[in-house]
Amino acid sequence: MYIDQLGVASGVVVLFIGVSLISLMYSRYKVLDSPVKQLGRRILLSLILFSAGGIGVIVDSLSKSQLWFLAAIPITISYILAVSAGVHYIRRIMYIGNYRQEEVSEKWALTGGYITRKSTKDLKELLMLLKENSNGLVVIGREPEEAFLRSSGVKPDRYIWLSRTGSPNSIDPAKLHMLQEEILRFAAKKGGRIVVYLGGFDYLLLYNDFRSVAKFLLNLKDHLMMKASLLIINLPEQTVNKLQESTLMREFKWLDEGRLLSEIEEIALFGIMRREGPSNAGTESSQGKSGDD
């Protein structure tokens, strides 16, 4: 049986290094916060490909056939992925660093209206990031708050339960004006810049005709835009017909999760830089004064 012992040893070393780094990186990845978690995800993928390259080296060393590509391809892709991830985040930091806080704030405001098929559970990462970089997250849902927290893993700043039970924090789905008032009251209290995720669209249609619900959503979106806020509507498949859907799409856009995550990422990175900057400066300043004294 053909065995290239040096090649096998090299492959084992590469595989051992890759698996060890994956284990180390994964333990760090679990506690990372967005947007740094996205960088961690890319590094993890790079390490997995690097480990696969180690397996490729071993396979090539056990065969007389020329199977070097089994190692070369994944290791090369791993290298490219790691370098591109690093360059991407360096460019982000340099780009954001060229803006003052006021300019960044004006450049990206949480405004507009979007429609998505995804639930809060599917949008957990996005909603958590929106919550962290806004003045508050409001979620309107069909289930009680406790059940919502268990199913979605998202804890909003304000949860509104669409229910006719009269329970605390619930609003009758037939009273759209009360629902709007409650949302706008929260936005005013927070000084604007909030995010509203509206679920239970089909439940609203049980107690209101489509025209009333559409008017409510358009009016709510306009009021929220005036307060530099964002409205996201969950619209499951077959909730409305094609004509009704096209009516909504005249005023709303399909949610582009990737684009929105990218924009929030810029603000989040800027916030990290801004928090660290004054703190470090203050520390250096105090140290300098202590030295002078």
Image: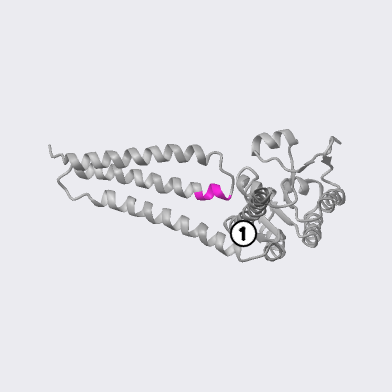
**In the picture shown, does residue 75 fall above or below 263?**
above
Which quadrant of the figure contains the N terminus?
A: top left
- Which of 234/281 is in front? 281
Q: Position of residue 79 (x, y in %)?
A: 37, 53
**Residue at 39% over, 44% down:** 48
Q: Is residue 9 visible?
A: yes
Amino acid type, label 1: Glu
- Residue 84 lies in magenta, yes or no? no
Secondary structure under tag 1 reads: helix
Left or right of 123 in this view: 190: right
Q: Position of residue 210 (x, y in %)?
A: 77, 55
Q: Position of residue 14 (x, y in %)?
A: 31, 42
**Residue at 43% over, 47% down:** 45
Write the start and end of the magenta stretch as one range.
35-39
Left or right of 227 in this view: 264: left
Left or right of 207 in this view: 289: left
**Residue at 57% over, 56% down:** 258
The residue identified by callout 1 is 263
**Magenta span: chief secondary structure:** helix
Count residues near mark 1 (Cα–Cα under 10 Å), then give few for <14, some for 14-19, many for 20+.
some
**In the picture shown, does residue 222 fall above or below 149?**
below
Q: Is residue 62 visible?
A: no
Q: Position of residue 167 (x, y in %)?
A: 84, 34
